[in-house]
Image: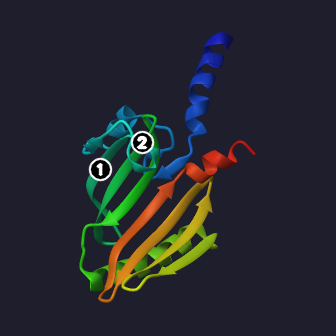
Amino acid sequence: MKLFLTVILLAVSPLSNAQSLWGKASVGMSVEDLRAAYPNAIEIDHEPTRRGGTSDYWQVNDVRIADEKFTASFYFREHRLDSVILRPQSREPHKMAAIAETLRAALMQKYGQIAGQSQSKGEFIRGSRVSWITDGTTVSLETIEGSSGPISLQVRYDSRISNAASNL
């Protein structure tokens, strides 16, 4: 009986220590785990090595956040989940500006104090990034704006910084 309980504890303990990224997604989960958690996930791309070192790329459409539809993209490194990116399905600049403000307020409420903030300006576009760090996951709200307003908006859940820091 003692051996049985020890085996159960050893099998369950890695699951309880899984670093959460977003929703039901955890760092290191396999594609099979992702498909079990999100049965409507579809494979978008599978390359030996994509930009940034990721290999598999899966997606879930029509994710509801703050009364808007988003697409959740799941990126794998060495066949293990590494990051999740949420992008609104609407591309209307006036609507994206409102979504960006709603998301910023919601992320501040959920994660508290901002860990980092940066801006960049080009001749025709400018970008901004606001980041929080929670339980080893970096959460970033990133926007790119043109003269008519936001043209790109995403919320990124990334494990890379925490992976590098885990050896310290």
Q: Give the percent coordinates (x, y) of residue 119.
A: 52, 79
Q: Give the percent coordinates (x, y) of residue 5.
A: 63, 18
Furthest-bottom residue in view? Answer: 147
Q: Earlier in the sequence, mark 2 or mark 1?
A: 1
Q: Quadrant of the N terminus?
A: top right
Q: Give the percent coordinates (x, y) of residue 14.
A: 59, 32
Residue that mark 2 sits on: 76
The answer for how far apart the CA atoms under marks 2 and 1 are is: 12 Å
Residue at the location (55% across, 74% down)? 108
Secondary structure at numbered mark 1 = strand
Instruction: Say above or below: 71 vs 95.
Output: above
In the depicted view, which residue is nearer to us: 2 or 70? 70
Instruction: Say above or below: 154 vs 167.
Output: below
Residue 66 quadrant: bottom left
Q: Residues within 10 Å of mark 2 (few under 14, many from 20)?
A: many
On residue 59, which mark appears? 1
Contact? badges 2 and 1 (CB < 8 Å): no
Q: Is residue 35 left or right of residue 81?
A: left
Residue 153 quadrant: bottom left
Residue at the location (44% across, 46% down)? 25
Secondary structure at numbered mark 2 = strand
Residue at the location (28% across, 82% down)? 93
Residue 98 quadrant: bottom left
On residue 152, which mark appears? none
Amino acid type, residue under disc 1 in the picture: Gln
Q: Is residue 154 left or right of residue 135?
A: left
Residue at the location (24% across, 72% down)? 90
